[in-house]
Image (cartoon, rainbow, N blue to C red):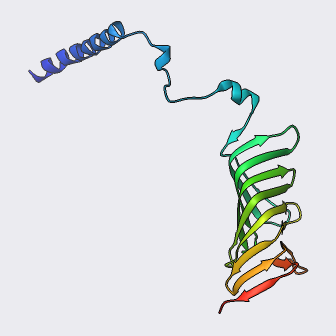
Amino acid sequence: MRSRIVAWLRVLLPLAALVILSTLFLLSRSPNPDDAIPYADVDAEALARDPRMTRPEFAGVTDGGAAVTLTAERATPAQSDTGAAETLRMTWRAPEGLAADLTAPRGEVDGQSVRLSGGVRVTTSDGWAMTVPQVDSDLRADLITGTGGLTAFAPLGRIDANSMEISRDDEGAHVLNLSGDVRLVYQP
């Protein structure tokens, strides 16, 4: 008895599936092109005139061994190796452990150098947090230079200076140098 039921079901179930599928295709409506993607408001002509990338990311290692990662909200390429970015974040990690995270509203990449501008926020792994109007970074030489005056908050207090530089010393370790009218307000 059971084998007869199984034999009938092996015939009836595929036929029922064919009937359901053919009913779906025969009774379906034709597609309306206006209903295709109602939430995609993209101006294709503007995209063609002004090419850009959304959320680009670049990662690499400098000649000195520091790992560098660049991310941005939006980047626009130029004709040569240069390009501009908005809301840029640069993460720089040296092999001996020093790390710096830099965020800026604007940035430019020109070959092996990166320029951040518009009020750059620099945070280092040893507790320094500073704001610099402009930071230039030479990835080939492992050099980060901030100009235009800065205000830094360190574990020892508040520091004001004209410029800053993260570079290698004679032993190869990375050092943060502040120069030009350096003023320390010590906070024990």
The answer, for residue 173, to whether it is visible in the render is no
Give the total of numbered labels.
Answer: 0
Please name the residue shown 46% across and 13% down the image: 32
Left or right: where 117 falls relative to 87 = right
* Quadrant of the image occupied by residue 172: bottom right
Measuring from the top left, give residue 140's x and y in whole percent.
Answer: 88, 60
Please name the residue shown 70% across and 40% down the image: 53
Please name the residue shown 50% across and 25% down the image: 37
**Which of the image's four quarters has the C terminus?**
bottom right
Left or right: where 111 falls relative to 117 = right
Say which of 105 and 64 sits in front: 105
Residue 113 position (above or below residue 29): below
**Residue projecting furthest to the left:** 1
* Quadrant of the image occupied by residue 160: bottom right
**Which of the image's four quarters has the N terminus?**
top left
**Residue projecting furthest to the top:** 26
